[in-house]
Amino acid sequence: MPFILLARILVKNGILRSHTSGANGGPGDQEVVRAAALRQPRRNQIALFVDDAEYPKWIESGGGPQETLANIARMCGGLALPSHIAVPLIHRQSSTFIFYNHLIEELLDLGSQSRAKDTQKNKKTPQKETTIAMANLSVQPRPLKVAISDVIAQAVEHRTAAEDYLQLLRSEPILMDAAIRMSYISRPELVPDDRGRILPLITDRYISSAFFEVMSDAVKVVDTWAYIVRLVSMLDGLNDKVKRPLLTQELSNTCHHEYRRAQAAFRRQMAVRPGFAGPRFRRIGGKIAMKGSPGEATISDPQLHYVLRLCHPDTSHKDAVEWIQKLDYHNAQYANDRSRLNGHQVLALGDLAIIISFMHTLSTALSMPTGSKKSGMLFIGRSAELDAELAMIKEQADFGDFLIPMHNVLEPGVAASALQALDAFVLEKAGESLGSLYDRMLQECLEDVEEKYMKTKARYDEKTKENGKKLGPPTHAQHSPSTAFKIEQRREKAKTRPLQVPIHDITAIDTEETPAGTGSAPRLQVKASVAAVFESLFAKSEARGSVAWADFATAMGDIGFSVTPKGGSVFQFNPPTDKMPVDSHSITLHRPHTSQIEGWQVTYFAKRLQRKYGWEKETFEVV
Amino acid sequence: MIVLAREAGGGRTCAAAKPVLPHFADKQQPLLLHIFADIGDIVSDIVSIAMDERSEAFETDGEISIPQQWRDLVRKYRNVGTKVEQVWRAFTPKQREEAMREAVGDGKVLENSRDPGLGRLRDFLPDWNLEDITSTPDFFLERLKFRVENNLQTQIFEGS
């Protein structure tokens, strides 16, 4: 760098000034490291500590006389240092900042722990054997063939579950915090690449990315299920020879898309180190890839083998059914192995199991074409475009004012402000809010379907007349207008064409304002132990404790629910026909990793049950 | 080069020397901190990587960006500085020690500024020692304040 340029930078940054002694009179870093510098080899290199973008910048001093070096140093206002001083100085500054950053996090952690200890003294009840509790429930095996109305009910259930999750993210900072952490510590940047390197460490900017991912994924999952519900509903009773294949293809592709999403999320969790599957993954660019083939672990570690199969991109959703069953069987046999999966991994596995199980059910109700990369790309195409756009926006996202340090969202009002900021940020960058982006995509996909149907039908009619050859379904037109144009277009649309589907807002919800249960649920006469379980679940947040999964399952069984295991710790509870309203549908719930429903999960269970059946504390009457 | 990873289980921050082959044997235990195992080796490692222009990885991979770490610290201080000060002052020296040991991952810290251990850590980080950091709250708080209120270049020449 020419010195004159250097000097300009220095002046601009206000660095060019004399350096004698500090305001408090303490020694600067250069002086402190003197002892270490003495032991350093001397090299013909100089470090410039001038530009933050490259701090330090190393240059060759050319082996010239000491004078040259002294000159450079003078020119840079002392910010050019020979390597034997620079190296320990770099070490001192980086160690100091890393330790100080960590110390702050640790002391806040310890501070909040000691506070928690003072207020919370209730001890966990010893865990009951979950498998025994489940045995008390009548297990309803998955039917060989299901009616399309049941498929719709299941899809609606999954959509509702996704909506409830999104709502809870908006109202419960505890869940938000847990979700951010789950995303943050599993980020692909921490998976070593071929050379064993991970991307830069702990910097707080990853918290912003994690937050962005949590919210956009939550909205995305809601919309995917909403779209699936629409497609299946449209298929119900449809005999149109043109429309039916078009819809089934689109449905198949959409399910496949969700399967791949859930699989990638599970892979991401399994690649976390430390962890028993961690060493089997590496990072290529920003993506997580598997090392070797899953089959290598067949003998040595069957559980790992099943997990790797489920993570592998070559595993189809049909094969995955078998691998999940094997994994479940293995985990049931070997309790120790079950605990090798951590809570996050079990959650991700549950999500994967849900779509695999749904696709399985779907295939028994409808003859489904296999996922196609060519035809029926409406949802996949639009979704990929939106994902790419959001990924670019995510890069610029910085919500550090709210999210730093980790767990700061637990402070009063912070989560709400962070959500507000995210909403405004996406609105500014993309022309519409996160929720509207996805909702509009859904609406456009449905319009695409109609448009494509009209076109295909016209062509079909024509061809039938001509007795022409068979035609394949057309694909989504790949016109990509520039981003700026797209954003402008969206703003225009938002004004002129309001969304017909409900917008999935992401801003915070005040729990106090959320409408309470409809109260319409008929009273249930139950045993005292059952009432106690639901009393804990529906307790107000301050009094919230934890409920053993075994107790919950037993209580559901007492009311008359039967259970259908969906694989991967996911269970579908089927309501009894006698005690519950006739239109009651099954509810799908994850068994928590610790077999203890606690923390945000208590709220989640309560919310799901309340939305699904209108239950609240008063529903249960002790006889 | 030093590379850090956050342990999945307990949220502890850990560090390991390059190449990144951290001790992940037991996920319950904080990872070992190897930074100071052999300072001479690592320092020459830093230099060799820094000097190796062919190593693209150095540009993007495993690099500790001092300015980034500094900005993180500045932001933490702005967001929760007051709380940090309250908590730190309310702590007993024993609690401060616990936090300090957690912060380095393997719990190894210098006893005092004269401690010759840990690969002669005192030669370049003498102020990060148990006695000074934990016996009174002010020592750390003053340094923290100085670090966040002054730019990196100033810190080369001045201290608190």
Image: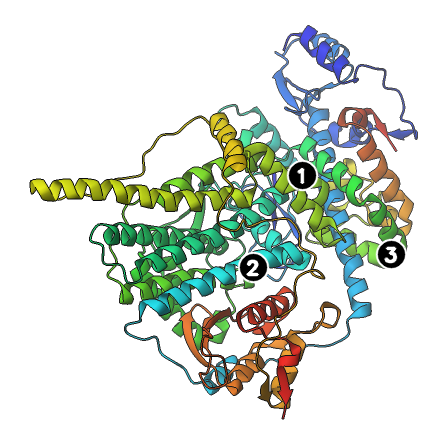
The disc labelled 2 sits on which kind of residue? Answer: Tyr
N-terminal of the pair, mark 1 or mark 3, is 1
Tell me if mark 3 has few (under 14), some (14-19) or many (20+) residues whose alpha carbon lies within 10 angstroms of its own: some
Q: Chain of mark 1?
A: B
Q: What is the chain letter for disc 2?
A: A
Q: Name the residue at 47% across, 56% down.
A: A270
Residue type (three-letter) at the residue carrying disc 3: Phe
Tell me where residue A167 sits by quadrant: bottom right
Q: Are marks 3 and 2 on the same chain?
A: no
> Who is closer to the viewer here, A618 or B100?
A618
Q: Is residue A189 visible?
A: no
Q: Going by the picture, which residue comes out furthest to the bottom?
A: A623
Q: Nearer the viewer, residue A66 or A366?
A: A366
Q: Amino acid at mark 1?
A: Ile
Instruction: State left or right for residue A589 relative to residue A100.
Output: left
Q: How far separated are the C-alphas under marks 3 and 2?
A: 38 Å
Q: Residue at x 68, y 24 (%)?
A: A52
What residue does disc 3 label?
B91
Chain ID at mark 3: B
Residue A165's disc number: 2
Horizontally, residue B145 falls left or right of residue A50, namely: right
Instruction: Answer yes or no: are tags 1 and 3 on the same subunit.
Output: yes
Position of A333 relative to A322 (above/below) = below
Instruction: Estimate the spatial distance between the alpha carbons at disc 1 and disc 3, rounded to whole Å.
Output: 32 Å
Expressed as whole percent of the image width and height from the top left, the position of residue A187 reads 54, 47
- Pointer 1: what residue? B39
Depicted A328 relative to depicted A261: above or below? below
Determine the residue positioned at 74% across, 76% down: A122
